[in-house]
Every structure is written in C-alpha cells, then in structure tokens.
Amino acid sequence: MKTLRALHDKAPNAKIVLMGYPRLLEKRGSCVLGIGTEEAPWLNEMGDVVATEMKGAVSDAGSYAVFADPRPAFAGQAICGDPETIHGIVLTGHSRADTKPNSMKSFHPKVSGTAHYAKAFQDALAR
C-alpha cells in the first residue's frame, strides 16, 4: 500500500489500476504434461488468493486506485480451454533471455489473451 500511496502523491490526478491475473488452467490442466489433478486446482486457487489480496490493497488505498480483474474474461479460455488464450508450456520460439527448454511465453497470454487484459483495464478505468 505504501507504493500505491507514493504513486498517488507523485500523480494526484491519476487513477492507479492494479491489474490482476487470470486463472491459468481449465479442465484441471489435463492438456499440460507434468500438471497433475492436484496441482491444477491449487494453481487456480492461488490466483484467487492473489486477487483477494490485490483487491484488499486497492480498497485500503482509497478512491484513486482500482483493481482490474481479468478472470471473468479468461473464464473457459485459459490453458486447455477453448479457445485457449494463455500459452501452456512453450518449447519453441526462444529468445536470448529464455532459459531452455521452456520459453518465457509459457503460462503467459497469447495475443488473443491480451484483449482480455485490455477489456479488464478499460472496465476498471470506467468505474
């Protein structure tokens, strides 16, 4: 919360948007090798825990901050969803910053998923 306050002090007319994370997996992660039936629900649950904490930080901050929750937009479209808008484990298309064998694209939005983030951001600004 100190960070949000410091931002507000530097830009008192700005609205601060704290962007949340989507749930990562649909269908208990059944399409991802190495993710078991216990890990998938836990990963999604941790995303919900983080969202709750982020909402609390925004609530504590005051009217100058809002929380943008992309989970509804991604619902049904995470890894193993249809359409899948988040990358599963990506083994190709490496950049120099990647640690092999996985690409940093793994568990991050596909281009189609960025539209979900944009919508959540715009909706939060409209509040």
Image: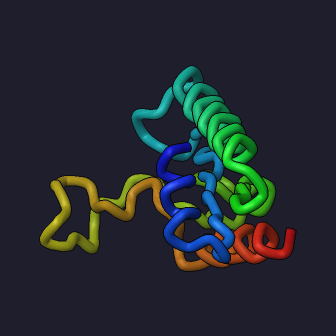
- Confirm whether residue 28 shows in the render: no
Residue at the far left in the pictured view: 96
Measured from the top left, where is residue 93 in percent x and y?
27, 74
In the rendered image, which quarter contains the C terminus? bottom right
Residue 53 vertical placement versus 84 (above, below): above
Q: Name the image colouring.
A: rainbow
* Residue at 28 percent of width and 68 percent of height: 92
| Frontmost residue, 16 versus 28 | 16
Q: Quadrant of residue 75?
A: bottom right
* Residue at 70 percent of width and 36 percent of height: 52
- Confirm whether residue 77 shows in the render: yes
| Frontmost residue, 83 versus 117 | 117
Residue 59 vertical placement versus 98 (above, below): above
* Residue at 58 percent of width and 39 percent of height: 30
* Residue at 48 percent of width and 51 percent of height: 3
Q: Quadrant of residue 48?
A: top right
48 sits to left or right of 24:
right
Number of dots carrying numbers: 0
Residue at the far top in the pictured view: 38
Measured from the top left, where is residue 44 in percent x and y?
63, 36
Measured from the top left, where is residue 84 in percent x and y?
63, 63
Residue 90 vertical placement versus 54 (above, below): below
Residue 6 vertical placement versus 94 (above, below): above
In the rendered image, which quarter contains the N terminus? top right
